[in-house]
Amino acid sequence: MSLIPDNPDAEDIAVDGGEVCTPAHCFHCFDALYCALVPSAKPIAAEFPDDKYPLFVTWNTLRPGHRHPRLRGCIGNFEPLAIQDGLAEYALVSAFKDHRFRKIERSELATLECAVSLLTDFEDAKTYLDWTIGVHGIYISFPHPSLLSKADASGTPSPMSSSSFLPRITSRQKFTATYLPEVIPDQGWDKIEAVDSAVEKAGWNGPVTEELRRSIKLRRYQSRKCKVTWDEYVNWRKEHGEDVVI
């Protein structure tokens, strides 16, 4: 799940190559979770610059005999955060406050994988199809379809066309949702399927019409990602002279 503000006015962060997200960021998240679950543990100071990025922290469970990990929690923020405190905070938020899952417990630590995504290269798309699968994540926002009119729809650039009718329902004024770049190819969606899924994820349970799609404001972005396993974290902690007890 993404924790998304109503107005994600993320700064235009562009990256010209180089290592943006590194194992050190993931180790910092693991350390925050480990120290929260083992109060006697001593935290290790962050070993990376305290730059500002929008970020997401994802916890996965690695299962013996399974090729793909299972999602255990994922929450982030589109506001650029100082990442030393931001990663530590969202490591715990995603571990304990993702409403889709129960809280991560100490007994699960050895099964976990941590992934950090630092979001970059935010751009306003020209249309809801103006992005590339496998390169961009998408953040969509759109008004309640009952607020749309034929005139408004016809004046909006569209890569498709439709004359579908939109019902008038006024329970909510604005909808928002996001998918990180890796989610869409993992699901095997094309662009329309991804956008329509994001519309449903945002909470709209009515028909997804072309007029609705044309009303979407889409902001595309990229993600610099790194992940580490529990065993890698244990070795890192031991290299810093700190034992691990679970």
Image (cartoon, grey):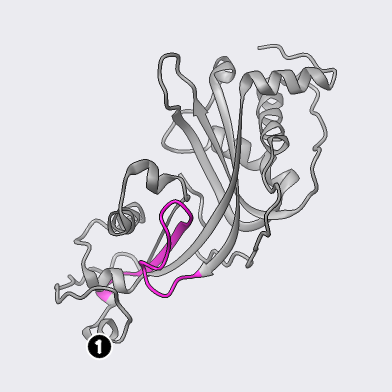
Q: Is residue 215 magenta?
A: no
On screen, residue 122 versus residue 66, left or right, reads: right
Q: Is residue 48 above or below residue 63?
A: below
| 179 vs 68, nearest the viewer | 68
What amino acid is at disc 1?
Answer: Ala
Horizontal and vertical percent position of residue 141: 41, 66
Question: In the rendered image, which quarter contains the C terminus?
Answer: top right
Dividing the image into 4 quarters, which one contains the N terminus?
top left
Estimate the x, y position of residue 135 in percent, counting from the top left. 48, 54
Vertical position of residue 178 compared to residue 89: above or below: below
In this rendering, would 157 be left or right of 228? Answer: left
Residue 129 sits in which quadrant? Answer: bottom left
- Could you tell me residue 27's position as x and y percent? 70, 31
What span is in magenta?
A: 124-146
Note whether residue 5 is visible. Answer: no
Is 162 displayed left or right of 185 in the figure? left
Location of residue 78 (image quadrant): bottom right
**Considering only vertical position in the picture, is 17 above or below 226?**
below
Left or right, 120 with respect to 145, comes to right
Tell whether position 140 is magenta.
Answer: yes
- Tell me what residue is drawn at x 27 percent, y 81 percent: 153
Q: Nearer the viewer, residue 17 or 27?
A: 17
> To which residue does mark 1 refer?
151
Residue name at image x 56 percent, y 48 percent: 76
